[in-house]
Amino acid sequence: MNGPERATFVIAVTALVLRSGGMVACADSAEMLQCALEDFPIAAPGDEIGPAHGRARELIAARRAGDETAYSEAKFALKLEMSAHWELRARAYARGSAR
């Protein structure tokens, strides 16, 4: 699925990981991500965004539990996934093979 729901998820998760701070400082971004996950509940098998989708779910679960430590760990893991995602996208554009 490469529709607007997926794009909204990618934008929301990228916005969240670019912000500094924990659950309180990033509350609005986490809420936006939660809404994006509701609209894009499952990443298709083989979708390059799949690992980040799983990490985003971990982050939201930690937020719901009020567990700042788990939230911070999930946010860091999500940041690594999105860094890898954007690096792959940049390489694809550089090679002219972006879709």
Image (cartoon, rainbow, N blue to C red):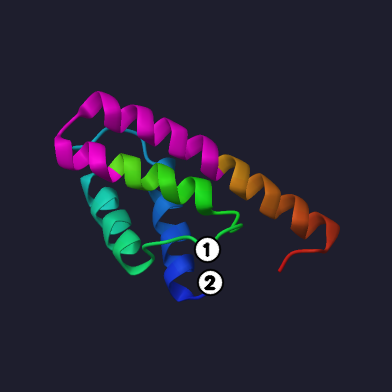
Which amino acid type corresponds to the residue marked 2 in the rendered image? Met
**Residue found at x 53% / y 44%:** 82
Quadrant of res 22: top left
- Label 1 sits on what residue type? Ala
| Label 1–label 2 contact, CB within 8 A | yes
The circle on residue 44 is 1
The alpha-carbon separation of the residues under discs 1 and 2 comes to 7 Å
Q: Is residue 34 left or right of residue 85?
A: left
Q: Tell me the residue at 76%/56% (across/down).
A: 92
The residue wearing badge 2 is 1
Tell me the SS state at disc 1. loop
Say few, some or many: other residues with alpha carbon within 10 Å of mark 1 (under 14 / 14 to 19 / 20 or more): few
Residue 16 at x, y percent in the picture: 37, 46
Image side of residue 11 versus residue 62, left or right: right
How far across and down, in percent of the image, does residue 53 sit?
A: 44, 51
Q: Is disc 2 surrounded by few (<14), some (14 to 19) or many (20+) residues within 10 Å?
A: few
Q: Main secondary structure of the magenta part?
A: helix
Q: Position of residue 31 (x, y in %)?
A: 23, 54
Q: Taking the image as drawn, is residue 51 in sight?
A: yes
What stretch of residues is rendered in magenta?
A: 60-82
Query: Is 9 a magenta residue?
Result: no
Looking at the image, tell me whether mark 1 or mark 2 is earlier in sequence order: 2
